[in-house]
Amino acid sequence: MSEICILSGNANKELAEKICKCLDIPLGEAMCGRFSEGEIRVQIVSNVRGKDVFIVQPTCSPTNDNLMELLILIDAVKRASARRITAVLPFYGYARQDRKDQPRVPITAKLVANIITAAGVDRVLTMDLHASQIQGFFDIPVDHLYAINTLCEYFEAMNLKNVVIVSPDVGGIRMARAYAKRLGAGLAIIDKRRMSPEETEVMNILGKVKGKNAILVDDLVATGGSLVEAITALKEAGVDKVFAAVSHGVLSGPAVERLGNCKALEELVITDSIPLSKAKKIAKIKQLTVAPLLAEAIKRIHNEQSISCLFDVNR
């Protein structure tokens, strides 16, 4: 492992340190600061010449700053003669605009993929993309991991009975089915109408949910409006307890307040792909680490081993 160097910007240094602890290696030194006018200033302190470098930098809020830090880190490492550069993006920002579903809108997921590739990265390691087809937006190898096993282990330990897995929309049915298979649970779908990017209206609930313990599964929670509305609809349909399992806790705007005031929600379980600030740490939010998953993937990539076993969402 002496030929591995793991670096991190300011986006989620705590997760990078956890990954290094799992691999039993020190976190590489990199200075990410600002010039007086606000421009990002980067210097790689550790020697990375000829090394296999992994840059851990989710492009979460502040998205633009973290994305620019990533690009500048890649450029600095490339110019420092690293053998290979892998961008480790536990959360891939700008992913929600992944197609032209309205006139005159951009496809930012593809744009950002182009920018990251142009910066000089050799491969990408990411987790629970908002849409799986984003893998194809890159012209370099992409390893796409899933947090399902980390989340399912938590719910298995709770030993819940009479469980139904609920997909918040038709698009999430594939992942919801994987959760249902792993937990041996039933499956239901919420039919909803999207009024705006942040607002939806629940139309119907497809499946048997009355008297059951429901687990809502999704890839991310932003303002929490859609999630709270879905939880309320499930409770009105006769669900006993409602939990939520979400890979990325964006938790922007009034999300924490909404979730804290939602009496029908028992617990929201998220991962540490995005750091959770002290202001967002409330009793109803449980954060699990994906550091062991990312560490295993990094080790296998470095050793040129298959990581297909880490993609298994049904084990």
Image (spheres, rainbow, N blue to C red):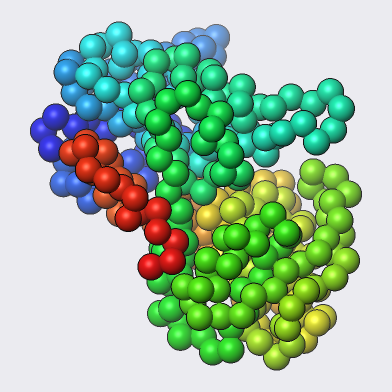
Residue 239 showing in the rendered view: yes
Residue 189 vertical placement versus 121 (above, below) = below
Q: Is residue 283 left or right of residue 170?
A: left
Q: What residue lies at 57% left-to-right and 24% top-to-bottom?
A: 112
Q: Nearer the viewer, residue 178 or 21?
A: 178
Residue 234 vertical placement versus 4 (above, below) = below
Q: What residue lies at 61% left-to-right and 44% top-to-bottom?
A: 131
Q: Classify the position of the N terminus by image quarter.
A: top left
Quadrant housing residue 263:
bottom right
Q: What residue lies at 55% left-to-right and 51% top-to-bottom?
A: 248
Q: Position of residue 11 (x, y in %)?
A: 46, 35
Residue 287 showing in the rendered view: no
Q: Position of residue 75 (x, y in %)?
A: 38, 13
Q: Is residue 243 left or right of residue 278?
A: right
Q: What residue lies at 43% left-to-right and 78% top-to-bottom?
A: 156
Q: Is residue 199 left or right of residue 162?
A: right
How many numbered marks appear?
A: 0
Q: Position of residue 32 (x, y in %)?
A: 39, 22
